[in-house]
């Protein structure tokens, strides 16, 4: 099973600041990685897929990059609605899709 | 707009079965897959499996093999997830989600990227 390790566990950020979230895969997953946001009490929402493609309606302040097996989600100029938990998910292994453990982005 | 509406909360005893439904609207049902993901209280997301409504092909998480069955009814655009032999650690919110279909060779497609989600169904397993 491909393990995704997200860091940090919690990120405290002031509104208007930027945030960088990391997701490291235990083996190569090519660019087959997505990011989801989950606000408290809500279902997850797709933000980015194929490492860097924003989903429909996702603002440009969300961006994704890859370096080998390390993936990054960058949020520039955080707004109040951006606080929540972020999960990465790999879909390179069809027999075992997996999620990372999540990074909580909280208000500083 | 795309909508996935799930059935209501369930309380079950250990050893029982539960069947959760997910009614889709706002898109061509056969053009996308359906995946099921669960979230135990205070925990992260766990993929359970996916189904291609066009041909009924399924992929299941290995840890649930033999206990889970995913089906679709294309006449009503509804997906179902049945989990048997319930245990206390199956207590979770169960989500369905529409999924893009990724090609895996020949006629093979699997549900990969989850772009619209249902509201979730709380399943509680308790004696």
Image (cartoon, rainbow, N blue to C red):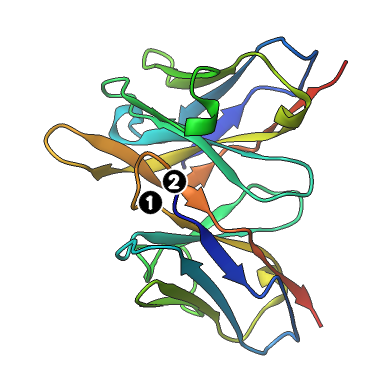
Disc sitting over residue A91 in the figure: 1
- Residue drawn 59% across and 68% down? A6
Report x, y in % for residue B48.
52, 34
Residue A56 is at least partly visible in this image = no
Disc sitting over residue A97 in the figure: 2
Disc sitting over residue A12 in the figure: none
Quarter of the picture containing the C terminus of chain B is top right
Direction from residue B60 to residue B119 in the image, left or right: right
For residue A103, which quarter of the picture? bottom right
B38 above or below B14?
below
Q: Nearer the viewer, residue A75 or A97?
A: A97
- Residue drawn 34% across and 59% down? A32
Report x, y in % for residue B88.
78, 26
Direction from residue A92 to residue B63 in the image, left or right: right
Disc 1 chain ID: A
Residue B63 is at least partly visible in this image = yes
- Residue drawn 54% across and 31% down? B63
Q: Residues within 10 Å of mark 1 (few under 14, many from 20)?
A: many
């Amino acid at each position: 099973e491909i393990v995704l390790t997200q860091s940090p566990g919690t990120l405290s950020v002031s509104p208007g600041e930027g945030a960088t979230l990391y997701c490291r895969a235990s083996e190569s997953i090519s660019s087959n990685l997505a990011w989801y946001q989950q606000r408290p009490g809500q279902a997850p929402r797709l933000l980015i897929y194929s490492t860097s493609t924003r989903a429909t309606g996702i603002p440009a302040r969300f961006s994704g990059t890859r370096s080998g097996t390390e993936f990054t989600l960058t949020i520039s100029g955080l707004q109040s609605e951006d606080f929540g938990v972020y999960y990465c998910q790999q879909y390179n292994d069809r027999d075992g899709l997996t999620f990372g453990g999540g990074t909580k982005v909280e208000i500083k | 707009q795309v909508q996935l509406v799930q059935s209501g909360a369930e309380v079950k005893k250990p050893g029982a079965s539960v069947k959760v439904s997910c009614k889709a609207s706002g898109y061509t049902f056969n053009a996308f897959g359906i995946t099921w993901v669960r979230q135990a209280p205070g925990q992260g997301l766990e993929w359970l499996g996916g189904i291609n409504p066009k041909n009924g092909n399924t992929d299941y998480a290995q840890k649930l093999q033999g206990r889970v069955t995913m089906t679709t009814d294309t006449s009503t655009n509804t997906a179902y997830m049945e989990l048997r032999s319930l245990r206390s650690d199956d207590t979770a919110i169960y989500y369905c989600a529409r999924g893009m279909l990724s090609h895996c060779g020949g006629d093979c497609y699997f549900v990969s990227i989850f772009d619209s989600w249902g509201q979730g169904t709380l399943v509680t397993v308790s004696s």
